[in-house]
Image (cartoon, grey):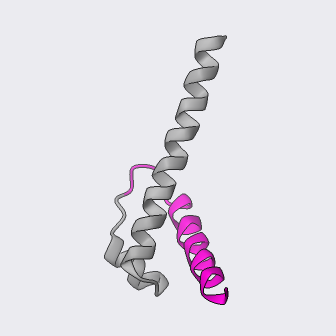
């Protein structure tokens, strides 16, 4: 179970770093992986998760505008 926890912690660290990045800034998978000492796969997964979060937030805002 410890391995799963470690992956989750690394993912959270990468997500925090991505979320702290200014919108519109290009993110290098290799660069971020090297900077945070994690695998490129971990960074790629976190980027996809961050993109999904943004899509969900946009959909909520659109839904609210439509209903009001």
Residue drawn at point x = 61 percent, y = 75 percent: 8
Q: Which of the pair 32/59 is nearer the observer?
A: 59
Relative to 67, say whether 20 is above or below: below
Vertical relation: 43 (above or below) 6: above
| Rendering coords of residue 24 (x, y %) | 39, 50
Toward which corner of the image does residue 11 lie, by quadrant? Answer: bottom right
Q: Position of residue 44 (x, y in %)?
A: 39, 67
Work out which residue is located at the far front of the displayed protein and give it: 1
Furthest toward the top, the residue is 68
Residue that appears at 33% across and 69% down: 28
* Residue 22 appears in the picture as rendered: no
Main secondary-structure element of the magenta-colored stretch: helix
Q: Is residue 8 left or right of residue 40?
A: right
Q: Residue at x 60, y 17 (%)?
A: 65
Q: Is residue 15 magenta?
A: yes
The residue range painted magenta reads 1-25
Q: Is residue 56 magenta?
A: no
Q: Nearer the viewer, residue 14 or 41?
A: 41
Residue 17 in sight here: yes
Residue 34 left/right relative to 67: left
């Amino acid at each position: 179970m410890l391995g799963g926890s470690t992956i989750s912690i690394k993912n959270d660290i990468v997500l925090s770093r991505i979320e702290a990045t200014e919108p519109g800034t290009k993110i290098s998978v290799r660069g971020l992986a090297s900077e945070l000492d994690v695998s490129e796969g971990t960074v790629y997964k976190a980027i996809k998760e961050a993109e999904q979060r943004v899509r969900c937030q946009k959909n909520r805002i659109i839904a609210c505008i439509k209903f009001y």
